[in-house]
Amino acid sequence: MSWLLDADVLSQPAKRNGDAGVTAWLEAHQNACYTSSIVIAQLAFWVRTKRGKSREVLQTWLTQLIEAMQGRILGFNVSIAHVWADLQYELQSNGSRMPIEDSYIAAIARRHRLTIVTGNTKDFRGSGIKTLNPFGGKH
């Protein structure tokens, strides 16, 4: 099985009090893990909200993360756009809504047949995409 990592999971190793269980899960599954350009954008924004030494450390971490994930960062392209349109139509038909960034992530996961690893599984409810919460129900 392959996984698409959401920002809340991918950021755990960089956090001062990150979840050790999630970090261990990431290490155990790292070769089957992907992320999306949308998640990288979310992480880049998070880094920009910090100041001083914290921002420098996080920027270095993000640069190293992007290098380590080379070839496993999936973008939003025309193919994904059509999957996203189908997903939006399905959600609308069912009376469901999803935050826009999450809908982009869900479309990428659907297109590549990946399970989304996130602590925010409720955000992906109704999408038909498999999710896994590595926080052990604490998140």
Image (spheres, rainbow, N blue to C red):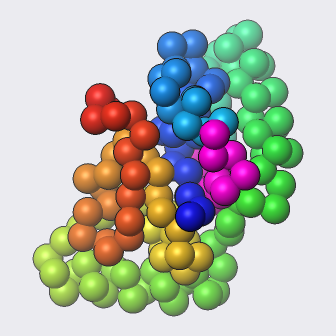
- Write down the quadrant of residue 93 in the picture: bottom left
Residue 133 lies within the magenta run = no
Question: Who's the residue at 46% across and 80% down the image?
Answer: 84
Nearer to me, 31 or 98: 31
Question: Who's the residue at 47% across and 51% down the image?
Answer: 117
- Write down the quadrant of residue 89 in the picture: bottom left
Where is the C terminus found, in terms of image quarters? top left
- Residue 100 seen in this snapshot: no
What percent of the width, then of the height, locates residue 34? 65, 57
Question: Who's the residue at 59% across and 76% down the image?
Answer: 112
What percent of the width, then of the height, locates residue 63? 81, 37
Q: Is residue 85 left or right of residue 47?
A: left
What percent of the width, then of the height, locates residue 47? 64, 30
What percent of the width, then of the height, locates residue 100? 40, 63
- 52 w.r.t. 9: above or below: above
- Residue 23 seen in this snapshot: yes
Q: Is residue 116 left or right of residue 38?
A: left
Residue 33 lies within the magenta run = yes
Range shown magenta: 28-43
Question: Who's the residue at 82% across and 44% down the image?
Answer: 68
Where is the N terminus found, in terms of image quarters? bottom right
**Please, what is the dominant secondary structure of the magenta stretch?**
helix
- 36 w.r.t. 42: above or below: below
